[in-house]
Image (cartoon, grey):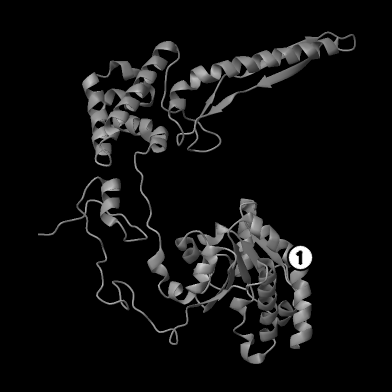
Amino acid sequence: MTMLAQRVFSSRSRWNVSTTTILLQGTRRNNAFPSTCSTTTAGAFTREIPVEQSPFRKYCGIAASGKSVKTTLLRVYAILIQATLHLAEQPEYKRLIDPYYTLIGYFNSIRELGGAVRLLQDDIPKRQKWIVKHYGHNKQRFFWYKEITSRMTSDKIAGLLKELESGVASKEALEKPSKNFLDVAIATNMISVGLDIDRLGLMCVLGQPKQNSEYIQTTSRIGRVHPGLVVTVYNPYRPRDLSHYENFKGYHAHIYRFVEGTSATPFSARARDRVLHALFIALARLQIEALAENASAAAIDTVPTAEIDSIINKIASRAAKVAPKLRADIIAEITEFIDTWKTCKQVNALPLHYYVWNTKKSARLPSLSLPTVTVFCNRPSARSPFCFSIFHLRLVFDINPCGSLMQALYFYRNNITSYLQKILILFRSLDILWKKAW
């Protein structure tokens, strides 16, 4: 007998699978796939390959006691940037240097990133001059740098990704910076997901990220096709960074073991405030024919109490599987919402709707357009029979379906006051202009 799964969901960790299943699915029956393997070198979909056979990523940890973190960081950046040019000038490494010619710098906060910008502008070039002089390099490498943070506008991200995809095409590109090629990119956790560029192979991480999953996601941006090098600069004056540095080899040998389990808090107070009323409306429109249509929001008074109670009990029973104490709170909150819905219907002469059509901004953001108000202000003149000014007022109110659906029930009552206030301001402006015209 073959049993088909009713629900399939994925998780990044296998910890607390049974508890998570109860919270999210409301059942204790679950089957984890893939099953636990008998060996550590092979899994259901993977097998271990020796590094000598297929190089992957190499991690290097640096913690300089007695020196400031900025001093350590500028020296690491300077040697990584300068060494790539030195290796590119050697024939045996020239064809292999492209993945490491772009340095990705990762920072845990914009404040730390801002400090690195000052280093890139002043201290790191000075350190490069010292390296050229003391290590006998032929020339200093000059570089372009850009940041990948939330301060960037979305239209610039596409151009930045194109620069990261561009490789070193010629000898001239190795010797002098090019605006079509990015030498250094400093970023925050924006690059943890979405930055899928195969050519990248060099990264410097400042400090241990707060979550191990973030550290894995970030360092996975490099070494996708070519072997990658990750240099992690630790702060020796932070106990957490120092602990990771002291256990550096053991931590990175079993890095996926330390991924934190995702917490699940369904039917929490804040979650109920945001979507409990939306859940009730969705079930009511699917099960009660009188409330199905868009213009049927005003028919809440005609629905039998038994049908409404059936939906309330269904939601409360599902929440009780997570925490039995929540049942009474959920029934009270939904009942209060229904009473507010009925009150809104009684006090408003205008019809109620769940949403409105003809959105101009977005297909998912409906809007209500109140009538256009056009005012003609005529002033007689000796030179012309009349002249007039046209004041055009159009009010558009947006209702976000992802937010509180109570807006859909209150948009007439809440916005009519604002509408009248704007009309009053308009006529006051007309009075001022009228006096100035005369």
Q: Quadrant of residue 70?
A: bottom right
Q: Position of residue 342 (x, y in %)?
A: 36, 17
- Indicate left or right for 409 with 59 as reference: left
Q: Quadrant of the N terminus?
A: bottom left
Work out whether 359 lies above or below 55. above
Residue 196 locus on image (x, y percent): 52, 65
Query: Which residue in the protein does label 1 denote?
Result: 121
- Report the number of numbered marks: 1
- Please name the residue shown 54% across and 68% down the image: 242
Q: Is residue 44 left or right of residue 134?
A: left
Q: Label 1: few (<14), some or many (≥20) within 10 Å?
A: few
Q: Nearer the viewer, residue 15 or 310?
A: 15
Q: Name the one closer to the observer, 412 or 372.
A: 412
Quarter placement of the C terminus? top right
Q: Secondary structure at mark 1?
A: helix
Q: Position of residue 117 (x, y in %)?
A: 71, 62
Q: Residue at x 64, y 65 (%)?
A: 185
When asked about the image quadrant of residue 317, the answer is top left
